[in-house]
Image: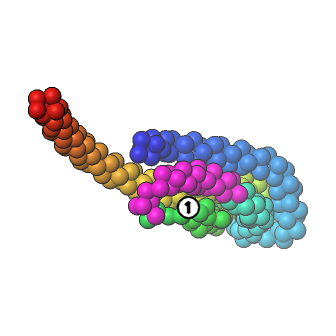
Amino acid sequence: MSQAVQSLNDLGFLFFGEQQRLSKNFSDRRNVFLNSTRAAAHSELDIALKSLPRSVGPRYRRTAMQAAQNVARHHVMPWLEGEKKNAEEAYRQIARRFTGLANEFLVKVRSFGNAELAYLPKELSAEEDFRTGSEFQFYDFVHIAIPASPVRYVVDLLLGAVRAHSLINADAHEFLDRLLETNSERVRNDLENRVSESRRQLEAEIRSMLRELSAIAERALSRARSAHAAGVAAVDSSLRRLANAEAELTLLAEGQISDLTHP
């Protein structure tokens, strides 16, 4: 019972520590992704922009921004799939560790042989995947890709008229950076949320098992105390009966000796 209570107190801290470790891992991997992807993504966007027809400014901006969106998706979405697999494996290791500890505890407690322990689950199972689905959606900043501002429209008309498409290209490259930064952060947040919710559900299952185990131990302890109290009373009663019997036998023996010595 004492061990179950202590495990309940420790469980939250242990889980939180593992989640913090995973969070740092996700952040580090995101930084690696951005540092290794930016140059290739901008090079890919340059090629796409060179192939675009030099149309009027507003139309060219829309096609340039769409090209930036396409490049960002091309890099973010495959990375997302790889991060899902990495995060799922990391979560499985945590789940196996904690369910393994819980199952070892169950085996140890069952060795006491209490009949009520038969009602406990035989073992907890670690899920092979997250317990929640992904909610990630690529955010494409439509209000930037297709600006509704009349001022922006007029400026783009002038840029197109003077063949200053390079200024729009620069905006497209800046937009690409924003897409990569924001969507990679959304991937990280999605994975952290899935770990957090999956961890919460697993922790709730283990806590439920430990609370049930503690309740069984408490009932068994109460019965043991009652049996001990009843046993002490029964032993005292038996001792009194034995003492009375011994006294009677002593008196009887003394009477018989007296009869033999005084005929």
Image coords of residue 36 (percent x, y):
82, 49
Residue at the location (85% across, 65% down)? 48
Image coords of residue 28 (percent x, y):
71, 44
Q: Characterize the local packing of mark 1: few (<14), some (14-19) or many (20 or more) Cα atoms within 10 angstroms.
A: some
**Would you place residue 218 above or below residue 80 in this image?**
above
**Would you place residue 21 above or below residue 42 in this image?**
above
Q: Nearer the viewer, residue 233 or 129?
A: 233
Residue 94 visible: no
Residue at the location (35% across, 52% down)? 220
Q: Quadrant of residue 73?
A: bottom right
Name the magenta segment's main secondary structure. Answer: helix
Whether residue 200 sits left or right of residue 231 in the image: it is: right
Q: How many marks?
A: 1
Verify whether residue 218 appears in magenta.
no
What residue span does the magenta drawing correspond to?
A: 89-118
Image coords of residue 169 (percent x, y):
78, 57
Residue at the location (67% across, 53% down)? 93
